[in-house]
């Protein structure tokens, strides 16, 4: 018994001691520690975070480099950490040299810009063997000067260089050609971007590339589709690809012999901008196998005269979608220049731009969109029939065109209208299949939510247009017919209060906001 009491007493004393110690820690903090006494490694990490927040090019009083003036300890730590000085500014000649000295043997990130002097260019490129990222944005004369230095340095391996970018001002009316000798030095690259330069495509051999962007670029001489695909196939690690095919492939003729498809197993994002002709777009897509692709964006110069290209472009988009990794696509946006299909709440997906087709013939455009949707939907693996949200931003669409488009979505739940002119034809289309309607087939029977993002000048305009009255009437008719909506979202002043009250009285939830919000943001919330 005594032993038990003794143990209990000891336990109680220990617990009291721990409680007292905890109270002491809360009430009496250790005032002997100071941030300047933190371990050097931790301070460097803090400085790197501050560097990332402030920005490397910020020369105001809040610049991160002011940490070197706080105290002696901080200064010693900062000056002895080469990683903090690995991105020297290139517009202050003397300071550039100082930062290069402090960087010691650290890998460098260099940006040569319009304010960079030739003396600074010489100083910086003298460390080419440890430059990790090099961005060149210079006028034609200075970029030629840089090019000469790079050529003279080709006897040294550029094994650290993993990011290379040249942005050339093509509006100057002069051209710049990158030497194949320099291109062959870029074999360790992971990120490459060329803007408005001329180069030899066949000299490009970068097996480690994960990102390639070529815009407004010209090639030395003509290349065949076979040469084009052959070089591209040597980049198996590509994750992001942006190509201006119109300038790369001058000829749009099909090759005389069939070309085998190539696979880019890691590619996730593909962008083909600048109004490509439909042949180049479809031929390119149909000869790629992209199992990881989840984002496709392209712009085509297609017009209403190109009817014969319908099947090819539809097949190309459908094939890309089927072979990619887009998942369950359930959201579509139809604008006057754009067709976008994606997963609900996500930006990535398929984004097709038609700058001219809609304005030449709106009905032709809607017909194509319908055919494109059908072409995608027939692929079982696409799961496209589960689409539940449609956003409409194309004006001048009539009731028949709207019914033709929306009639393809048997599981549609949410409709977003982003143009005033769509309200009138929408009112007519939504009345299909209601009691007393001449049409026996209801449109969008599963529709539950409607969002109206409209420009409204105020209540004085309610009596000037019957579109909102017609929409109000058709929504009431759908409710009486047993397939009414559940939620109506609209911006302030889009509908008079008595209409809103009628909707609320029959159980429709009306949400009103002062100004337009992003449908995607609203749906996520």
Image: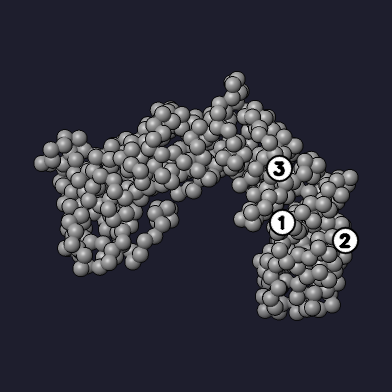
Front residue of this view, candidates 104 and 346: 104
Looking at the rendered image, the disc whose residue lies closer to the viewer, 1 or 3, is 1
On screen, 480 above or below 52?
above
User: Is residue 381 rendered to the left or right of residue 86?
Assistant: left
Q: Give percent across and percent down for residue 506.
A: 18, 54
Instruction: Kindly report the distance in space between the C-alpha atoms of the residues bearing marks 2 and 1.
Output: 32 Å
Q: Residue beneath label 2, please? A: 104
Which residue is painted at 67% across and 30% down in the image?
227
Q: Give percent across and percent down for residue 407.
A: 28, 37
User: Is residue 386 rendered to the left or right of residue 180?
Assistant: left
Kind of element beneath mark 1: helix
Q: Earlier in the sequence, mark 3 or mark 2?
A: 2
Instruction: Kindly report the distance in space between the C-alpha atoms of the residues bearing marks 3 and 2.
Output: 34 Å
Looking at the rendered image, the disc whose residue lies closer to the viewer, 2 or 1, is 1
Which residue is painted at 42% across and 53% down in the image?
520
Q: Give percent across and percent down for residue 73.
A: 84, 75
Report the quarter where the N terminus lies.
Answer: bottom right
Residue positioned most to the top: 257
Labelled disc at residue 199: 3
* In contact (CB < 8 Å): disc 2 and disc 1: no
Q: 10 Å neighbourhood of mark 1: few (<14), some, or many (≥20)?
A: some
Which residue is painted at 32% across and 48% down in the image?
415
On screen, 488 above or below 267?
below
Q: Residue beneath label 1, please? A: 140
User: Is residue 175 rendered to the left or right of residue 502?
Assistant: right
Looking at the rendered image, the disc whose residue lies closer to the viewer, 3 or 2, is 3
């Amino acid at each position: 018994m005594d032993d038990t009491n003794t143990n209990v007493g000891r336990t109680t004393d220990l617990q009291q001691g721990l409680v007292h110690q905890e109270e002491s820690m809360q009430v009496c903090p250790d005032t002997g520690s100071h941030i300047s006494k933190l371990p050097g490694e931790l301070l460097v990490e803090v400085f790197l975070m501050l560097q990332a927040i402030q920005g490397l090019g910020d020369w105001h009083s809040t610049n991160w480099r002011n940490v070197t003036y706080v105290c002696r300890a901080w200064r010693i730590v900062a000056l002895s950490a080469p990683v903090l000085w690995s991105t020297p500014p290139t517009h202050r000649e003397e300071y550039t040299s100082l930062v290069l000295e402090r960087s010691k043997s650290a890998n460098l990130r260099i940006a040569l810009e319009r304010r960079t002097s030739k003396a600074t260019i010489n100083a910086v490129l003298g460390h080419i063997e440890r430059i990790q990222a090099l961005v060149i944005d210079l006028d034609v004369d200075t970029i030629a000067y840089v090019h000469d230095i790079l050529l003279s340095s080709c006897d040294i391996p550029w094994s650290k260089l993993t990011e290379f970018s040249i942005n050339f001002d093509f509006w100057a009316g002069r051209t710049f050609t990158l030497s194949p000798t320099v291109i062959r030095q870029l074999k360790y690259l992971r990120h490459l971007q060329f803007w408005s330069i001329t180069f030899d495509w066949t000299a490009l051999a970068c097996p480690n590339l994960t990102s390639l962007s070529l815009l407004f670029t010209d090639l030395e001489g003509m290349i065949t589709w076979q040469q084009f695909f052959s070089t591209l196939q040597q980049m198996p690690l590509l994750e992001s690809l942006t190509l201006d095919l119109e300038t790369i492939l001058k000829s749009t003729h099909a090759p005389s012999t069939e070309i085998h498809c190539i696979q880019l197993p890691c590619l996730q994002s593909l962008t083909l901008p600048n109004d490509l002709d439909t042949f180049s777009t479809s031929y390119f897509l149909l000869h790629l196998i992209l199992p990881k692709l989840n984002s496709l964006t392209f712009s085509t110069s297609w017009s209403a005269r190109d009817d014969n290209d319908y099947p090819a472009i539809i097949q190309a988009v459908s094939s890309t979608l089927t072979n990619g990794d887009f998942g369950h696509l359930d959201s579509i946006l139809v604008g006057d220049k754009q067709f976008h299909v994606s997963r609900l709440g996500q930006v990535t997906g398929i984004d097709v731009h038609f700058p001219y087709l809609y304005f030449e013939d709106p009905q032709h455009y809607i017909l194509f969109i319908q055919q494109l949707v059908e072409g995608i939907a027939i692929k079982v693996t696409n799961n496209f029939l589960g689409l539940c949200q449609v956003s409409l931003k194309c004006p001048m669409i009539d009731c028949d065109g709207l019914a033709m488009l929306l009639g393809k979505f048997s599981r549609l739940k949410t409709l977003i209208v982003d143009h005033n002119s769509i309200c009138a034809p929408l009112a007519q289309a939504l009345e299909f299949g209601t009691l007393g309607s001449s049409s026996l087939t209801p449109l969008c029977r599963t529709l539950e939510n409607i969002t109206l993002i409209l420009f409204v000048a105020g209540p004085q305009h309610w009596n000037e247009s019957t579109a909102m009255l017609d929409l109000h009437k058709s929504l009431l008719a759908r409710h009486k017919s047993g397939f009414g909506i559940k939620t109506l979202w609209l911006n302030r002043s889009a509908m008079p209060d008595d209409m809103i009250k009628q909707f609320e009285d029959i159980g429709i939830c009306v949400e009103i906001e002062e100004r337009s919000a992003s449908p995607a943001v609203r749906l996520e919330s």
